[in-house]
Amino acid sequence: MTKKKFDVFGVGNAIVDTLALVDDQIITDLGVDKGGMSLMDSENQARVLGRLDHKNLQLASGGSAANTLVAIAQSGGSGVYCGKVAHDTNGEFYKLDMEESGILFPVPLTPEAGLPTGTCVVLTTPDAERTMCTHLGISTKLHKSDIDLDLLAQSRCSYIEGYLWDSEEPRAACIEAFEQSRQLGVRAAFTFSDAFLIDRFADDFHQVVSDYCDIIFCNADEARQFFGVGSIEECTTRMAAICDLAFITDSADGCHVIENGVVTKVAGFPVKAIDTNGAGDAFAGGTLYGITSGMTATQAAKWGNYFASRVVEIIGPRIEGSIKDHVASVCG
């Protein structure tokens, strides 16, 4: 592999998560889309929190791409994370938590009146499904000038999350990261993030894949939405026609690896899932670690599947500590 200081340069929403275990009735009462991500203002998010005053709540730094970068570090890799937080208590917590996880976080805390650090209430039901209620806060002000080109140039791969497409300035920052990755010879990876984004930005996502992407991450539902077909086999065929390397996860069935027109199924690991929050992020992190450390695509996907299997066995999107000592036994 090319000698670089960092494995992955991640760009995403910097969000502080509040995690709670709830029953299905709360999801129904709140009127949110179970299993999805609902954007809301601070007043509506406070209404959600008001329903949880009797619950044990857990706080964690989050955001899809941030979880992926932490998984890379826990695999033994290195990364830089570009996300916007405010100069408030949540912002200070977020920056410290990322740095303690082994990720460089170069974007300074921003003292911008009226815009707090982004927050997300993650509601997990007994069937292990997670429902997210998100107030993006200052993460909507991520600017293309926040993309540190020197650090990007020192990275083997960039990784950009589709959630950023919801706001104009972060969308421009994504395009800047893609453009600069191409100019600097850095491989560019993109995750679709959520099927609702494909609904809203289908043309944009197709253009991004066509113009910039070396690596695609999505789940089976997102792939079906992207291609407008119901068969996952048809999705893999269509993906092979537009991208040299892609990974389509399929829950407990593992994932499909599409590489240079060849489709390979990589089996998952048997687990008893209690919380799916962060599984896709963990898969991407494990897989990107594998790719940037010289594994084959199928070896990398196997490590991604293993990492995801560890995450769904716990509450929250991240495991504790490093599991780099497991790489050889899983992928050897």
Image: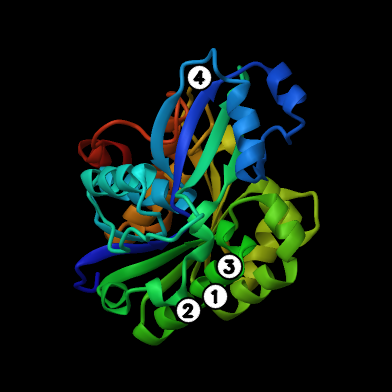
Q: Which of the two discs, 3 and 2, labels the residue nearer the N terminus?
A: 2
- Write down the residue under mark 4: 272
Q: Which of the two discs, 2 and 4, labels the residue nearer the N terminus?
A: 2
Q: Nearer the viewer, mark 2 or mark 4?
A: 2
Q: Which residue is more in the foreground, 249 or 181?
A: 181
Asked if residue 250 shows in the view, the reply is no
User: From mark 1 to mark 2, how far is it between C-alphas?
Assistant: 6 Å
Q: Which mark is residue 261?
A: 3
Q: Which residue is more in the foreground, 227 or 275?
A: 275
Is mark 1 in CB contact (under 8 Å) with mark 2?
Answer: yes
- Write down the residue under mark 2: 176
Q: How dense is the environment of label 3, judged by Cα within 10 Å: few (below 14), some, or many (20 and up)?
A: some
Query: Which secondary structure, mark 2?
Result: helix
Query: Which secondary structure, mark 1?
Result: helix
Quarter of the figure with residue 201: bottom right
| In the image: residue 258, left or right of residue 4 | right
Q: Amino acid at mark 2?
A: Glu
User: From mark 1 to mark 4, how far is it between C-alphas?
Assistant: 40 Å
